Amino acid sequence: MASPTGTENLGGIPAARIARLHADESATYAARRPASRAAAGNGIPGYLFGQPMHWMADWPMPFPFLVEKAAGATILDIDGNRLDDFCLGDTGSMFGHSPAPVARAIRRQASRGLTYMLPDPDAVDVGLLLQRTFGLPHWQIATTATDANRFALRVARAVTGRDRILVFNGCYHGTVDETFVRLIDGRPANRPGLVGEFRDLAQRTAVVEFNDVEALEAALSTREIACVITEPVLTNSCMVLPDSGFHDALRRLTRKHGTLLLIDETHTISSGHGGYTRRHGLDPDLFVLGKPVAGGVPASVWGMSEDVANRFAESERRREPGHSGMGTTLSANPLQFAAMRACLSQVMTPAAYEHMDTLAARLEAGLAAAIARHRLDWHVVRVGARVEFICAPGPLRNGGEAEHAHAPALERALHVALVNRGVLIAPFHNMMLVSPATRAAQVDRLVRAFGDIAALLKP
Ligand SMILES: Cc1ncc(COP(=O)(O)O)c(C=O)c1O
């Protein structure tokens, strides 16, 4: 895992071998993509730094390919290369690309108006579906998980009259400014690299390590914390599972100290129907789900308990007139409702999760076997349909360990090598999603490709 001297983790592979693999695979990648190279090889004209979204430059390939189309769990580029897609828009398409019921709903809605600032009959159905699926009684619609988290945190502050929040080291909840706080040499500080941030975010945000109940209790006992925001499993660095009893302690301590608990299920919705919350009986005050909730159409939902809703209503009575600071014009539009209704009722079904879970277990076992066969000191973690291989020993217990377990040079080489063998995984870490459209043959191809690359790295 983390080198105590701070040198880069190479996963036990010589640096020269990694560099050679990356160079060879990058050349192969480029040679197979003349059309993408012509269009995007030197950046796409018209865009800042050559990409419509700055993180598209972070893909590990020499240049991103242009997508011709995607369907189910397959993606086709404009040069005719077909890939098994385990990235799935990093969760936005977790239930497959253009699931048929969602595509039908979009087609139907396309001729009925796309945004009204008014509810429609689908909105009525979606409210009930959200209650039924996730168990919380009161919901609001937003467009991104970032926004949903931001609004839920506002409610937490309004309800508790406190202005500080607590995050776990290594978290990511979207571009919510106040969550960009890290432990650096054991002290809270702004996450390095923030563009244009002018505040000391650590003034209003406490940060402790995941699974550190003692530090959590010390922070909460100040009784200054409005809300703890967390994923039930840290998924945004290398994946970190909660210790047994951690969620019980988190819930008990937040209640004891008058702090609300916001569970962000945007990634862990992979856990099963109703998310990790339902599967493991968590009892959050606030709940957020973005990305896949509308089958790939931009939408997010945030829910709250009866108690929080009552307290929020009370605080609304005291609020001075004016803008709440929450909400965006295009949120809760009829296209979102049509897509969410289809997704929640026909796509995110218990049967779909059963398929995803079974194949994800097959993927986990296949990768673990390849790691063992090649005597790599790596490990595999799985949360339902979300699987990750980590090029370091495990299990990891917190965000600090997860950060050190990253092996950027090795991961980049591996990712390009996987693409050349017909497999796309998430660009930022070694994350793979299994969708209802994914087939066993695709899982087996990924396992084989991973084994072939492992053999090159550790002959
Ligand atoms: C747990 C979690 N919450 C929130 C977000 C933000 O989602 P969005 O980029 O759609 O706002 C992400 C994005 O990766 C996430 O992983």
Image: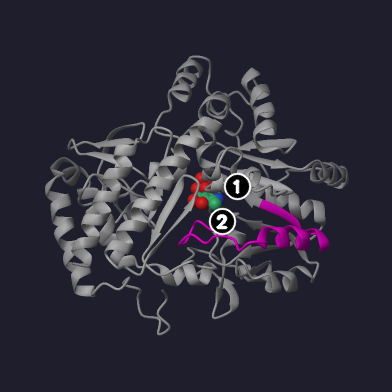
Give, as a single range, the part of the protein colored magenta. Answer: 233-262
- Three-letter amino acid code of the residue under disc 2: Val
Query: Disc 1 marks which amino acid?
Result: Tyr
Q: Residue 233's mark?
A: 2
Give the secondary structure at mark 2.
Answer: loop
Q: Position of residue 209 (x, y in %)?
A: 60, 70
Q: Residue at x 54, y 48 (%)?
A: 268
Q: Is residue 301 above or below residue 7?
A: above
Q: From this view, report whether residue 308 is shown above or below residue 189.
A: above
Is 218 left or right of 415, judged from the image as shown?
Answer: right
Can residue 323 be seen by looking at this rendering? yes
Q: Residue 23 lies in what quarter of the image?
A: bottom left
Quarter of the image for the N terminus: give it: bottom left
Q: CA distance from mark 2 to mark 1?
A: 9 Å
Label 1 belongs to which residue?
Answer: 276
Q: Residue at x 19, y 70 (%)?
A: 17
Q: Nearer the viewer, residue 50 or 157?
A: 157
